[in-house]
């Protein structure tokens, strides 16, 4: 036999001890934990990036919808308009909040209580709407190339740090004639047995006006008048609503709620919702007389912006209506949109905290009513020199709307009403600012539209 080689102590192999195994396992767990954390961080980054990209996409979609509405605006912003021309209207309501209101505070919210209302025309696919039938059931859908559109924001319930808003777009079809129920073919109207608020909260997408207890579909000519528009005359022709037919709040009163203008008391749903987690919906008008402050090495600041000072270095900017800042560079030139509403519009006293741009209507100068309470009716269009000043029409008041500004003895001083801001509007700017909660990032999109032919 061949003897086996002997083993000495150096040839013996040892296994891992329990302590070594525990150390190795602990090291493995540490490495795996680090890898898991890295993957979690990567996943959160991807998820956050996806959330931000989705928000950007939704904001671009909202901006496209707004640009389309403004591009199809039917009314020339040259107040006052002649209703016979059938142009519809453009109205901007400036709420009490501004971006500078929040600039010095801890909140990141901004100007959220503005309202944009206009009539618009679709040159591509028609607008689609619904109307309720008997008992509130949806009987029909309607199509029209014309619509009355309202953009506004409402506070989102149970949100804080920051408090956010929901942006809505209310669309009402302008049809004039609807030859089916609930607008009967015989009289083209709907006898409404319930309340006006019930109609506003029902799923009815037809622009209507209320006369007595009957609802009539609006035409563009009708919508030139404030009392025919969305949420301007909730009590109807037989109620206590009267000129200047201020925009109604949720309780159908003139005074807005603390968080700005509230529309229907019921929560709006579905296709009316444009964006959520909104921090600001700021509608500004272009004012060539507005002061602009430019500090060395800084961006230009206009009234309403945080950090603006009253010492101007330039003129012309997009500003909030009634910004209340004079331009010392333009001494002797009246400001266009910095003050309160023109007194004869009666909007300056009806809602003191709000400012309104309105394309207005010459209808009030020939409606047989005494809007200014001086005992005379329609003295601005009666062909008489009621104020005995020997003058004739002067821009922007054209008594009969023929464009020549010369109508017997009628003149601007005799007009019973005047637009709240009797100046042409060259352009508007809308800033929409949103918050992405998972990444705590803020995004803003700015839409500008010029009304000047180019």
Image (spheres, rainbow, N blue to C red):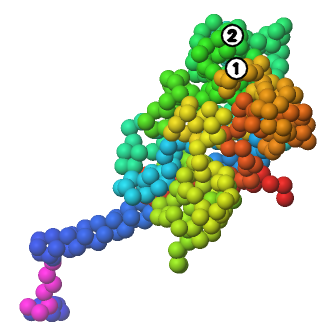
Q: Are marks 1 and 2 in contact (CB under 8 Å)?
A: no
Residue where numbered disc 1 is placed:
375
Of badges 1 and 2, the one in the foreground is 1
Horizontal side of 288 relative to 443 (left or right) equals: right
Element type at mark 1:
loop
- Number of residues whose C-alpha sits closer than 10 Å to that of mark 1, classed few (under 14), some (14–19) or many (20 or more): few
Q: Which residues are magenta?
A: 9-15
Q: Is residue 11 magenta?
A: yes
Q: Is residue 13 magenta?
A: yes
Q: Which residue is depicted at the point 48% across and 46% down?
A: 97
- Number of residues whose C-alpha sits closer than 10 Å to that of mark 2, classed few (under 14), some (14–19) or many (20 or more): few
426 vs 351: above or below: below
Element type at mark 2:
loop
373 vs 26: above or below: above
Horizontal side of 295 relative to 149 (left or right) equals: left
Residue where numbered disc 2 is placed:
212
Q: Which residue is depicted at the point 37% across and 45% down?
A: 160
**Residue 434 in picture, x, y percent from top left:** 51, 52
Horizontal side of 328 relative to 286 (left or right) equals: left
**Residue 157 in picture, x, y percent from top left:** 42, 36
Asked whether the viewer can see residue 398, the reply is: no
Asked whether the viewer can see residue 373, the reply is: yes
**Residue 247 in picture, x, y percent from top left:** 59, 30
In this orientation, which residue lies closer to the viewer: 59 or 201? 201
């Amino acid at each position: 036999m061949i003897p086996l080689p002997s083993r000495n102590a150096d040839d013996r192999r040892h296994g891992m001890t329990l302590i070594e195994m525990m150390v190795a396992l602990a090291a493995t767990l540490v490495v795996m934990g680090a890898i898991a954390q890295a993957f979690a961080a990567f996943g959160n980054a991807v998820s956050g990036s996806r959330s931000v990209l989705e928000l950007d996409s939704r904001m671009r979609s909202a901006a496209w919808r707004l640009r389309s509405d403004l591009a199809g605006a039917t009314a020339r912003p040259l107040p006052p308009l002649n209703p016979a021309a059938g142009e519809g209207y453009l109205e901007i309501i400036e709420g009490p909040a501004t971006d500078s209101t929040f600039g010095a505070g801890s909140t990141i919210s901004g100007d959220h209580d503005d309202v944009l209302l206009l009539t618009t025309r679709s040159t591509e696919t028609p607008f689609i709407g619904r109307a309720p039938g008997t008992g509130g059931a949806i009987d029909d859908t309607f199509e029209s190339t014309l619509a009355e559109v309202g953009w506004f924001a409402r506070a989102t319930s149970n949100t804080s740090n920051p408090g956010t808003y929901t942006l809505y777009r209310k669309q009402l079809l302008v049809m004039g004639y609807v030859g089916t129920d609930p607008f009967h073919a015989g009289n083209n109207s709907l006898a409404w047995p319930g309340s006006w608020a019930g109609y506003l909260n029902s799923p009815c997408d037809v622009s209507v006006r209320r006369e007595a207890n009957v609802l009539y579909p609006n035409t563009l000519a009708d919508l030139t008048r404030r009392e025919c528009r969305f949420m301007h005359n909730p009590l109807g022709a037989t109620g206590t609503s009267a000129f200047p037919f201020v925009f109604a709040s949720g309780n159908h009163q003139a005074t807005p709620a603390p968080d700005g203008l509230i529309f229907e008391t019921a929560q709006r749903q579905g296709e009316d919702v444009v964006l959520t987690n909104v921090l600001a919906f700021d509608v500004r008008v272009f004012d060539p007389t507005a002061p602009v402050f430019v500090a060395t090495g800084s961006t230009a600041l206009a009234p309403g912006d945080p950090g603006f000072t009253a010492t101007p270095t330039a003129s012309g900017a997009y500003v909030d209506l009634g910004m209340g800042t004079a331009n010392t560079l333009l001494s002797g030139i009246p400001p266009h949109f910095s003050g309160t509403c023109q007194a004869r519009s009666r909007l300056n006293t009806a809602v003191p905290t709000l400012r309104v741009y309105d394309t207005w209507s010459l209808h009030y100068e020939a409606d047989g009513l005494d809007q200014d309470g001086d005992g005379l009716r329609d003295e601005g269009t009666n062909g008489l020199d009621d104020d005995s000043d020997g003058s004739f029409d002067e821009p922007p008041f054209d008594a009969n709307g023929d464009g020549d500004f010369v109508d017997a003895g009628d003149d601007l001083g005799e007009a019973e009403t005047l637009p709240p801001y009797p100046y042409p509007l060259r352009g508007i700017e809308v800033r929409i600012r949103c918050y992405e909660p998972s990444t705590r990032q803020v995004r803003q999109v700015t839409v500008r539209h010029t009304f000047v032919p180019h």
